[in-house]
Image (cartoon, coloured by chain):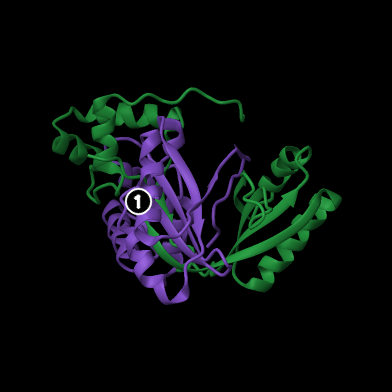
Chain colours: A green, B purple
Amino acid sequence: MNAPEPAFLLDETDRRLVRATQAGLPLVPRPYHAVAEALGLPPEEVMARLARMQQAGAIRRIGVVPNHYALGYRANGMTVWDVADEEVDALGERVGRLPWVSHSYRRPRALPLWPYNLFAMVHAHSREEVEARVQEIAALLGGACRARDVLYSSRILKKTGLRLAD
Amino acid sequence: MDATDRRILNALQGGFPVCERPFLAAAGPLGIGEAELIARIERLLEEGVLTRFGPLYNADRMGGVNVLAAMAVPEARFEAVAELVNAEPEIAHNYRREHALNMWFVGASDTPDGVEAAFRRIEERTGLTVYRFPKEREFFVELKLAV
């Protein structure tokens, strides 16, 4: 799953399609037809290209993107862990499978300021709930974990989708 | 938000169909009509319950890059620095977090140099170090927020 896959190569039409839809789909009964009309493409081609990008993983999913805060998930903790290098990949896989973890990555440390190499985003309704989940992750990591921290987000300063340059 | 809004949120965090009348196709299982689904999504966007509706693109899979970064911003300059960071089109997300590193953002671009150029501009304009935390490995997750 983590073997580097070749990137999906966008042609110029794909790029126009990404630019036309990255901020959202039109809220009309035939949204793909509306996009097609704006781009001067047949609707069938727009739908086929979107389906292909989705299949290739260039589109993760199509749907609603909720604002966690508005949904009551006000305690969003970025949990960070200093895990032994030789164990971090196997343990990271297990952390990622916890149902309330939305993202989990191995990242480089920035010593001495930042000793953490495993990031796991935890979404919960309260800090108490986050702390309980942190305990669960700590138990899973066991002795391989040397240090940890939880960074809470207190404000969204910006949230947009991918922006392809014009 | 009522029960129907919650059903929409739970059902449509992915899997919105690609077909001629996708709202019609998605509305049926939710027990509402096409026009009502469109109107509700429109309202949820206006109310800020949704940040967006549409395809969620993955820059990594399109030959682009997507890099997490952080800065330690002095409190007195926080708003001004946030404005400078947010003004960069490559900055997709920016969050305030409670830590010495108090501003965390994601640079996303379809060109490898785009993100790095944005980070350098931010460093020049703010005089602050941008700590880069590129992903070295992504672990599988399957999250949908239950409402």
Q: Residue at x 29, y 51 (%)?
A: B34
Disc 1 secondary structure class: helix
In screen coordinates, is A57 left or right of B53?
Answer: right
The answer to whether residue B48 is seen in the rendering is no
Q: Residue furthest bottom?
A: B76
Tag 1: amino acid: Arg
Which quadrant would residue A159 be assigned to in this image?
Answer: bottom left
Q: Residue at x 46, y 32 (%)?
A: A57
Counting from the top left corner in percent of width and height, residue A123 is at 59, 61
Q: Is residue B102 above or below residue B67?
A: below
Q: Nearer the viewer, residue A57 or B70?
A: B70
Which quadrant would residue A80 be assigned to in this image?
Answer: bottom right
Q: How many marks?
A: 1
- Neighbor class of circle 1 (other Cα within 10 Å; few <14, some 14-19, many 20+) is some
Counting from the top left corner in percent of width and height, residue A124 is at 61, 65
**Which quadrant of the rendered structure holds the N terminus of chain B?**
bottom left
| Mark 1 chain | B
Residue indicated by mark 1: B121
Q: Nearer the viewer, residue A27 or B105?
A: B105
In screen coordinates, is B98 left or right of B103?
Answer: right
In screen coordinates, is B78 left or right of A107?
Answer: left
The answer to whether residue A104 is seen in the rendering is yes
Q: Is residue B62 above or below residue B6?
A: above
Q: Residue at x 66, y 52 (%)?
A: A111
Counting from the top left corner in percent of width and height, residue A29 is at 23, 46
In screen coordinates, is B94 left or right of B20?
Answer: right
Counting from the top left corner in percent of width and height, residue A136 is at 77, 58
